[in-house]
Image (cartoon, helix red, strand yellow):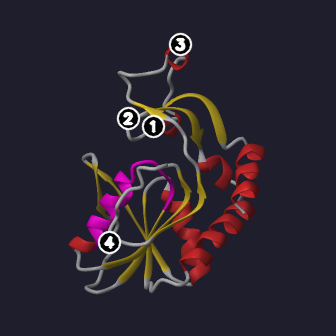
Amino acid sequence: MSEDLLALFRKTGALLDGHFILRSGLHSRQYFQCAILLQHTDIAAHVCGQLADKLRKFECDTVISPALGGIIVGQEVGRSLGKRHIFAEKEDGKLVLRRGFQISPNERFVVVEDVVTRGGRVQETIDIVRAHGGIVSAVGVIVDRSGETKPDLGCPFVSLIEMTVETFPGDNLPPDLAKVPAIKPGSK
């Protein structure tokens, strides 16, 4: 399955090669631009349906995702599971619940995201659920690029693709990468 999905990323132009600055601040030679893949509604339904299938075994009342990248994933996973979908979005640099979204005590959630490297935004979303008395049953992502440094999120973690992509701190780039201008593709 993951090889087919990886081929789909390449076919749609959603797997980019170059010099990228990730949301985590790390630098990388590859970047998964899930929005390019998910702009095709039939592909979004298919891929997110596969993620939903991996999450079905976990108790869930609601799906939650961090904005912006996780919104399409959350909506499609929620639709596939027949569950409500809400999202957290940035306000003053941190994720919060807005737009009247509510979390009830003991409400069970799956958190979904497009791509995880360190898991920072997923952890922020988990913290929001727990702060409102909700329970996180599992986390599901399309692409897990955390490699051997898998984030410990305190709940089961599933993905459709596990890919080890080299990342580097900005002050310790390999010479070949340092010669290529860096871009932040998530903001373009």
Residue that label 4 marks: 100
Residue 56, horizontal then vertical, whole percent: 55, 82
- CA gap, disc 1 to disc 4? 30 Å
Furthest-front residue in this view: 148
Label 2 element class: loop
- Label located before the other in sequence (3 or 1): 1
What residue did someone put label 2 on? 25
Residue at image mark 1:
22
Q: Are marks 3 and 4 in contact (CB under 8 Å)?
A: no
Nearest to viewer (mark 3 / mark 4): 3
Three-letter code, disc 2: Gly
Residue 6 located within the stretch drawn in magenta = no
Asked if residue 91 is positioned above or below residue 41 in the image, the reply reads above
Mark 1 or 4, closer to the camera: 1
- Left or right, 155 with respect to 182, comes to left
Among the two numbered marks 2 and 4 on one chain, the one whose residue lies closer to the N terminus: 2
The region drawn magenta spans 113-129
Sequence order check, earlier mark of 3 and 4: 4
Residue 114 lies in magenta, yes or no?
Answer: yes
Using a 10 Å C-alpha cutoff, classify the residue at mark 2 as few (fewer than 14 neighbours), some (14 to 19) or many (20 or more): few
Q: Quadrant of residue 65?
A: bottom left
Q: Are marks 1 and 2 in contact (CB under 8 Å)?
A: yes
What amino acid is labelled 1 in the image? Leu
